């Protein structure tokens, strides 16, 4: 059975990685399936458990860490864990599909270290910190304090960009989507000239 490839998108919050990932999922020939991450944070807006994230209480998340059930995980903010369950990736790969991830930079680099040949890491860069702040405030989903935490973390995340296989500047969303499509198609062996 053909094991799928792993395509990992990471970026600071607000850079546009989720929008790009959703665009790629709409292209059937890429044979992608989204890896649903586990998270210990509260649901936002219309998020659905098992579709957007597997929402776990912090205590349950820590138990899964102890049981080695995660391919990667990170305590992104205090008591705010995110991670990729090994069973989720196995399920998708065993079906012969390529796995696409929308995760933080630490998790992305951990997956690349574990599976260097099967993994493509893509870093989505915002045009500037000011644009990032504008996008985060435009979501209207978090307090100013949370936004400040995300912006502070963004500088650290931006410093990891050179460790990724590919960097995409998202200053023009249509251009960024097209670039992501070409890069992923080439990685999975499809000619999208």
Image: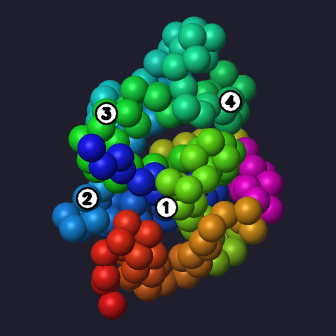
Residue 21 rendering spot, x and y as whole percentages = 39, 60
Q: Which residue is nearer to you in this view: 185 or 21? A: 185
Q: Which of marks 1 and 2 is nearer the N terminus?
A: 1
Distance in Å between CA atoms under marks 4 and 2? 31 Å
In the picture shown, does residue 173 fall above or below 47?
A: below
Q: Which residue lies at the image location 73% right of the left edge and 56% below the top edge?
A: 157
Distance in Å between CA atoms under marks 4 and 1? 20 Å
Q: Which residue lies at the image location 40% right of the left edge and 26% below the top edge?
A: 87
Q: Which of marks 4 and 2 is nearer the N terminus?
A: 2
Most distant residue in the bottom direction: 193
Q: Which of marks 4 and 1 is nearer the N terminus?
A: 1
Most distant residue in the left direction: 28
Residue at image mark 3: 91
Magenta stretch? Answer: 149-160
Res 31 label: 2
Disc 1 vs disc 2: which is toward the camera? 2
Distance in Å between CA atoms under marks 1 and 3? 23 Å
> What is the crowding at mark 1: few (fewer than 14 residues within 10 Å), some, or many (at least 20)?
many
Residue 69 included in the magenta stretch of the image: no
Res 75 label: 4
In the picture shown, does residue 106 fall above or below 89?
A: below
Q: Can residue 138 be seen in this view?
A: no
Distance in Å between CA atoms under marks 3 and 4? 24 Å
Q: Is residue 42 visible?
A: yes
Residue 179 rendering spot, x and y as whole percentages = 45, 81
Residue 133 rendering spot, x and y as whole percentages = 64, 62
Q: Which residue lies at the image location 63% right of the left edge and 67% below the top edge?
A: 165
Residue at image mark 1: 17
């Amino acid at each position: 059975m053909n094991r799928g490839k792993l395509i990992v998108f990471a970026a600071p919050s607000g850079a546009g990685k989720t929008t790009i990932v959703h665009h790629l999922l709409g292209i059937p020939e890429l044979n992608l399936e989204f890896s649903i991450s586990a998270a210990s944070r509260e649901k936002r807006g219309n998020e659905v458990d098992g579709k957007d994230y597997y929402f776990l209480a912090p205590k349950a998340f820590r138990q899964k860490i102890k049981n080695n059930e995660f391919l990667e995980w990170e305590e992104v903010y205090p008591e705010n864990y995110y991670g990729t369950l090994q069973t989720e990736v196995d399920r998708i790969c065993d079906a012969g599909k390529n796995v696409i991830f929308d995760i933080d930079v630490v998790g992305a680099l951990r997956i690349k270290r574990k599976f260097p040949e099967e993994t493509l890491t893509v870093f989505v860069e915002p045009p500037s910190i000011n644009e990032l702040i504008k996008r985060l405030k435009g979501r209207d989903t978090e307090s100013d304090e949370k936004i400040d935490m995300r912006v502070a973390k963004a500088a650290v995340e931006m410093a990891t960009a050179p460790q990724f296989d590919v960097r995409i500047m998202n200053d023009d969303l249509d251009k960024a989507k097209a670039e992501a499509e070409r890069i992923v198609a080439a990685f999975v062996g499809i000619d999208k000239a």
